Amino acid sequence: MKAVNNHYDVVVIGGGVVGCAIARELSRYKLSIALLEKEADVGWGISCRNSGVVHAGFNYKPGTLRAQLCVKGNKSFAKLCQELDVPYKKIGKVVVAQKKGEIRELKKLKAQGEKNKVEGLQIINSTELKRLEPNVKGIAALYSPETAITSPYLLTIALAENALRNGVCFFLNTEVKSIAKLRNSDFRINTNQGEFISSYVINSAGLYSDRVAHMVSKDKYRIYPCRGEYYVLDKNASWIINRLIYPVPKAGASGLGIHLTPTIDGNILIGPSNEYIKIKNNFSTTSPVMKMLSAEARKFLPLISPGYIIRSYSGLRAKQAPSSEGGFWDFVIEESDTVKNFINLIGIESPGLTAAQPIAKRVVEIINKKERLSPNPQLIILWGQEV
């Protein structure tokens, strides 16, 4: 079906990695699809401002969507990157204990990961840690060989380009102002670039997903922006570590702690911090947090020198949990219980990058159960593939 006069079968709101994954997954079927993104390009929000980690899935409570979709995403990530010609490296991760009491937490993480069906987890002693990471200080560690890294912005762009080749229409610089449910059950979506009509709306607006949800009903959802600041080290410092280096996570924390992440490009990231803020587009970096990042990193890597630092940046998380509670709430991926054909994705923070493809498949399943979708006979999946 082709869209006529901006009338589509499905409109996806939000061009982050999850929104673009949804658009790509929907393009497998005979549907007219539009993706609306308020920025000048896809991936300009959360998706280009994270660590680029493909998580294994041991950090998340068993039985939650976060855990289930993270593990699925990890297992299929290499194939996804191969299809899209996106860089991917399985380098592994160590969660390092520096106190005896933290070893108990490592064992809990390992047990939790095994319940989530994460493969290859091992508790290693200081000698084994020194063999893997000669420059890292610690008395023990949880070793996860399945953790990997990718380029979050290249992945988002590749998902969008593949969706575009399969007929998805992208509208950039297009901000949704209001949504109305029409008598024929369609939606009228008013934007700064005009009006769109759609049978389904998928709310994948990240930090603004609560605002979009409230356009159609007085939902309970609320998103709290949580800023994470990073340092970037020069590529000349890439020899310092071989894997991702994480601390033992603290109970009730809003993230996984200040960690060190090798990137696909050869730099090392230090961060992120965790700070609830009021403004959803505040990507500032601050002197006190920068000092804290350096101090925390040197606890694991005394060799880190200020001379290695070449820049800083920050990203934001779309937290559902308020600052008074902290921690992580589960992903919300569901059709509105008050407005038919309106699908909400709320609180898709880490591991949203890892879980992007399984999240997309789950959204398509919701629609497919209602519509019995027909396959797209001209589907292009592999990079370089021709029709």
Image: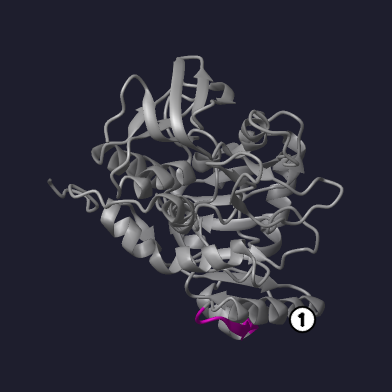
The foreground one among 181 and 206 is 181
Left or right, 293 with respect to 196, comes to right
- Where residue 226 sits: x, y (%)? 71, 41
Residue at position x 77%, y 75% from top?
102
Q: Is residue 228 visible?
A: yes
- Where residue 85 sits: x, y (%)? 27, 52
Find the magenta span and give its range.
Answer: 119-126
Badge 1 marks a residue whose secondary structure is: helix
Residue at position x 74%, y 53% from top?
254
Q: Is residue 173 visible?
A: no
Q: Is residue 360 magenta?
A: no
Q: How packed is label 1: few (under 14 Cα within 10 Å), some, or many (20 or more)?
A: few
- Where residue 154 sits: x, y (%)? 37, 44
Placement of the C terminus among the 4 image quadrants = top left
Mark 1 sits on what residue?
A: 104
Q: Residue furthest right?
A: 324
The foreground one among 177 and 132 is 177
Q: Looking at the picture, which amino acid does disc 1 mark?
A: Arg
* Rendered view: 143 above or below 191: below
Q: Is residue 121 magenta?
A: yes
Q: Residue furthest front?
A: 183
- Where residue 209 sits: x, y (%)? 62, 37
Question: In the picture, residue 5 is in which quadrant?
Answer: top left
